[in-house]
Amino acid sequence: MKLLALVPARGGSKRIPNKNIRALGDKPLIAWTLDTIRGVSDVADVLVSTDNSAIAEVALAQGALVPWLRPAELATDTATSMAVCMHALDWYESERGPIDGLLLLQPTTPFRTQENIQKGIDLFRENPRHCVVSFSHAESHPMWCYRLKGDKILPFIENTSTQAIRSQDLPPAYVVNGALYLASPTYLRENNSFLGHRTIPLVMEDPRETLDIDTEWDWLLAETLLKQIPL
């Protein structure tokens, strides 16, 4: 099986400037993902899609493939992850030949393990017509959530009342954690999405692996984890 690992790393982060090359512990944030994917079986190349020359330099130094800087239209706040994926996929297959799967690894989830990446690949190998996406347990159950309507507070899920339900009696709820996406080129071109009725969940139990760094608070949590728990 031949997989292309894609690491998207835009340079225009507003909440955390220069996030992808900011030092987390002893190395840039993006290096955590590049180090983890190195040596994983079936990954033919690791391609970093970026619009930023500084990120490109760091990625190249880490041994990643950076064949171009991302087109301007794919470097805006409104550009979708799927558009970035298809741009990289189309280029790679035209230049390097067909692949069996595109493995999307966002650099903002630095603590995912090589073990779980391999589990995702194994699931995909068993179900090549499907898509594998990583999930984790929802921190706040949707049946305990509320919404505001004017000066009123209403259940987020209408026509439900959970006040008398113990939390342990609620059905488990899961969220996409952004750590791993894997699908075949055919699946992506047909569905233009990693999510659908043929999505197979890879459930990650360790909350450290699912930390998605989007704010300075998330960054503080990541630094705290590094100080307290060896990763």
Image (tube, rainbow, N blue to C red):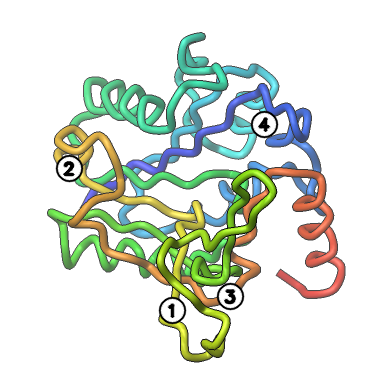
- Closer to us: 56 or 209: 209
Please name the residue that numbered disc 2 is placed on: 187
Q: Answer few, some or many: residues within 10 Å of disc 2's Cα (few below 14, many 20 plus, some between 14 and 19).
A: some
Q: Position of residue 22 (x, y in %)?
A: 78, 38
Crowd rating for badge 4 (residues with CA inside 10 Å; few <14, some 14–19, many 20+) = some
Q: Is residue 16 left or right of residue 4?
A: right
How many marks the image carries: the answer is 4
Viewer-nearest of labels 1 and 2?
1
Q: Given the image, on which type of amino acid does mark 3 rest?
A: Asp
Is 113 placed left or right of 119 in the picture?
right
Q: CA gap, disc 2 to disc 3? A: 29 Å
Q: Which mark is residue 172?
A: 1
First in sequence, mark 2 or 3: give its number. 2
Which amino acid type is shown beneath numbered disc 4?
Answer: Val
Q: Position of residue 225 (x, y in %)?
A: 79, 67
For this view, does 215 lie left or right of residue 182?
right
Q: Which residue is mark 4?
A: 58
Element carrying mark 4: helix
Label 2 SS: helix
The residue located at (50%, 25%) in the rendering is: 66
Please tell me which residue is depicted at 38% across the width and 51% down the height of the picture: 181
> Quarter of the image holding residue 6?
top left
Q: Earlier in the sequence, mark 4 or mark 1?
A: 4
Distance between the Cα atoms at labels 4 and 3?
A: 28 Å
